[in-house]
Amino acid sequence: MEYMDTPSTATADAAGPRWLDDEEQRTWLAYIHASTLLEDFLDRQLQRDAGMPHVYYGLLVQLSAAPRRRLRMTELAKSSKITRSRLSHAIARLEKSGWVRREDCPTDKRGQFAILTDAGFDVLRQTAPGHVHAVRQALFDRLSPEQQKSLGEIMRIVAEGLQPKEAGADLPWLR
């Protein structure tokens, strides 16, 4: 494995990479393991309770928070950090369930809105308590208030550092 077969030194010579030291490697592998397990746990809960994957639930949540429960498809792709193709497939599945509908943009013939239907809002309202319980059970109930605050600060720093600021960045959700 690329992480296990690397030197344990964090220093790099002019020709080589700066490898993770032992503590950084343990932290990185713990993050990968926990984030995979957390996503799987939440996905299984939502599949069981609502018949939808976690990413679809996230789309419904974003639409429910938007003015008039509607967003341009391009904005929804951007805020969800998924490709427009993947979003189009997800919205088609949500339309089939009657939870979302599309509407053409009157000012842009190429644009479309995704709109949360009343049925979609109802399924979100019914599913949210179980999902919040799962989030608490899997994450927040395991952490002290100080650890929760630290985790939030760390995640904001990581997200800010990874969010491109330059115009024209090659981002999957802009393709």
Image (cartoon, grey):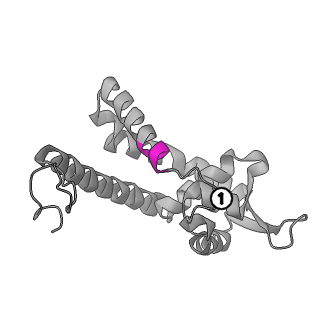
Crowding around mark 1 (Cα neighbors within 10 Å: few <14, some 14 to 19, many 20+) is many
Which residues make up the magenta segment?
A: 158-162
160 part of magenta stretch: yes
Element assignment for label 1:
helix
Closer-to-camera residue (78/118) = 78
Q: Name the amino acid type tagged 1.
A: Leu
Q: In screen coordinates, is 14 left or right of 143? A: left
Q: Which quadrant, please, contains the C terminus? A: bottom right
Q: Who's the residue at 15% across and 69% down the image?
A: 1
- Residue 65 lies left or right of residue 106; in this view the side is left
Give the x, y percent position of residue 152.
41, 35
Q: How many callouts does the rendering have?
A: 1
What residue would you read off at disc 1? 76
User: x, y percentage for residue 46?
Assistant: 45, 58
In which quarter of the view is residue 85 placed?
A: bottom right
Q: Identify the image quadrant of residue 144.
A: top left
Query: Height in image: 65 above or below 107?
Result: above
Q: Is residue 17 magenta?
A: no
Question: How would you classify the magenta stretch by its main secondary structure?
Answer: helix
Q: Position of residue 78 (x, y in %)?
A: 61, 58
In front here: 86 or 58? 86
In the image, taking residue 146 as reference, residue 61 lies left or right, namely: right
Farthest right residue in view = 106
